[in-house]
Image: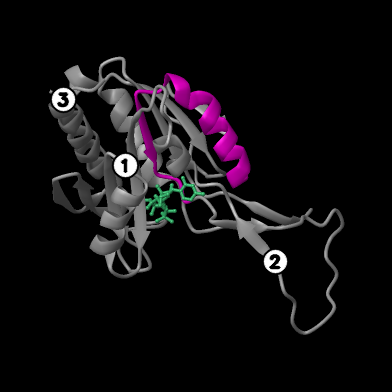
Amino acid sequence: TAQAVLQSKKILITAGPTREPLDPVRYITNRSSGKMAYALAHAALAMGAEVTLVSGPVALSAPDGARLIQVETAAQMHEAVMTSVQSADIFIAAAAVADYSPVSVNDKKIKKQNDEVVILLHKTRDILADVSKLTHNRPYTVGFAAETHDLERYAQDKLIRKNLDMVAANWVGKDKGGFESDLNALSVFWHGGGVDLAMTDKKQLARQLMSLIAEKINEKNTI
Ligand code: PMT
């Protein structure tokens, strides 16, 4: 059972949005509430795992028994993950990490001036890709894919390009599920297979995903 596979396994989960500052009072962020990731933490703990949550700013409290590392920016999340990942058996990237951050952060509040302004952004480091690239103590690595179109194609592409063990893809920008909602649905892919987990409460969905991860790890018998 999932309980037997996950018992005492160390699971590292990223959660929530990141905040990329522009100046002392402004930042770029996204609509992630952390509900999906925190539900995964709950489910994993209930199955006997040891859980570390690396979380961006959310309005949720961490489940009892989880180790919580709070971060703000994508760079901080990257650093926190890279220092904790060495001891992790499973890594789940459920956070909505900013893909781009401002090239420079103004130390003073940016004043209102022209009718149009240009903000220069550069790519952040991809936490999931860097974990997946580890050659020493690489955990079983699960990515998420948040897509508004061509869900299966992009999810399969992430699975292969980032060399993941599993990818959980969800539709976002629709009226049900995805960001902020209590509900979600996932199309899950691994090398050689996949399954659709139907729209349901994120807590229920998290239990289904954790069971699926346990099942696939058991089949691979790699950890
Ligand atoms: O938080 P909720 O409101 O409950 O919403 C849940 C969710 C929709 C945020 C969640 O289910 C989800 O899909 N999380 C991933 C969101 C995302 O950023 O997807 P993406 O397709 O842009 O990124 C792909 C993967 O790369 C993700 O696993 C992401 O965590 C990871 N990534 C992306 C960029 C980066 N710099 N580092 C990363 O690790």
Is residue 72 among the parts visible in the rendering?
Answer: no
Q: Which mark is residue 32?
A: none
Foreground tag (1 vs 3): 1
User: What's the CA distance linking mark 1 and mark 2?
Assistant: 31 Å
**Residue count near mark 3 (Cα–Cα under 10 Å), binned few <14, some 14–19, many ≥20:** some
Q: Secondary structure at mark 3?
A: helix
Mark sitting earlier along the chain (3/2)? 2
User: Would residue 9 appear left or right of 3 to someone viewing this image?
Assistant: right
- Range of the magenta residues? 72-96
Identify the residue at image location x=26%, y=20%: 223
Q: Is residue 207 visible?
A: yes
Q: Secondary structure at mark 2?
A: loop
For residue 218, the mark is 3
48 with respect to 162 (left or right): left
Question: Does the numbered disc 1 mark a residue whose Cβ is under 8 Å from ligand 1?
Answer: no
- Read off the residue under disc 1: 164
